[in-house]
Image: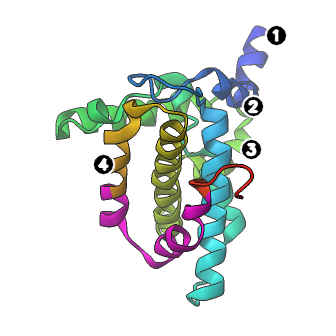
Amino acid sequence: MADNKKNNSFFAVFFRQKYINRWGLMRNVTNENLSTHAAEVSCIAHALAVIGNTYFGKNYNADRVATLALYHDMPEVFTGDLPTPVKYANDALRQCYAQLEQKAVEQLTDRLPEKLQGEYKALLEITPEDEQLKKLVKGADKLCALLKCIEEEKSGNSDFSSARVSTQRSLKAMSFEELDYFIQHFLPAFEGTLDEI
């Protein structure tokens, strides 16, 4: 029985994302966990796909990109949310973390019946067919980091000021038309108060 519980615990593990806090090195006015982050990235990634399809003649599968975004950080249930300065400090650390993340994906898919493993592995490991969607998920992920910085600064937390600057720099370097459209048309509302929006 215990073996069966472990073999069918994928979704129980998914729901544990709410216990993994993000921004561990920062003082937070509002704590953000992986569940909240996954939902927000999923929303924004879906929006980027719809924007691309509507305004730029793309043919993105918006439902697929939303689902990829929903699962994009699930391995962190096992690895934790490693701070960005550590994760990307050098090539050796980046490679070690990639191996750790790969092991986490294996541990996660092992918690599913064999017939379901392929479907979920394809959500946890981006396939070559999903490369364009991966760009949207990464853009949404970075945009959500900026939204977190804005939220914290609006609450009087200046600890996020330098994170905001570096995140804006990353978004500018990442620039693609769907992301730029969202930033131009939708980002300003996030600076407003409840009454203003």
As measured in the structure, the alpha-carbon distance from the residue carrying label 3 to the one carrying label 2 is 15 Å
User: Residue 83 is drawn in which quadrant?
Assistant: top left
Query: Mark 1 or mark 2, which is nearer the start of the sequence?
Result: 1
Residue 193 x/y as whole percent: 66, 50
Q: Nearer the viewer, mark 2 or mark 1?
A: 2
As measured in the structure, the alpha-carbon distance from the residue carrying label 2 to the one carrying label 1 is 17 Å
**Residues at circles 2 and 4 in contact by the CB criterion of under 8 Å:** no
Query: Mark 4 or mark 1, which is nearer the start of the sequence?
Result: 1
Q: Is residue 1 left or right of residue 169?
A: right
As measured in the structure, the alpha-carbon distance from the residue carrying label 1 to the one carrying label 4 is 49 Å
As measured in the structure, the alpha-carbon distance from the residue carrying label 2 to the one carrying label 4 is 35 Å
> Which mark identifies residue 128?
none
Single out the residue that lies furthest toward the bottom. Answer: 57
Identify the residue shown where x is 56% and y is 54%.
191
Q: Which residues are magenta?
A: 169-189
Q: Is residue 107 left or right of residue 3?
A: left
Amino acid type indicated by mark 2: Phe
Amino acid type indicated by mark 4: Ser
- Mark 2 crowdedness (10 Å alpha carbons): few <14, some 14-19, many ≥20: few
Residue 68 x/y as whole percent: 61, 54
- Magenta includes 9? no
Query: Mark 4 or mark 2, which is nearer the start of the sequence?
Result: 2
**Residues at circles 3 and 2 in contact by the CB criterion of under 8 Å:** no
- The reply to whether residue 70 is in sight is no
- The reply to whether residue 102 is in sight is yes
**Residues at circles 2 and 1 in contact by the CB criterion of under 8 Å:** no
Q: Which residue is mark 4?
A: 166
Q: Which residue is mark 3?
A: 115
> Which mark identifies residue 11?
2
As measured in the structure, the alpha-carbon distance from the residue carrying label 1 to the one carrying label 3 is 20 Å
Q: Nearer the viewer, mark 2 or mark 4?
A: 4
Amino acid type indicated by mark 3: Lys
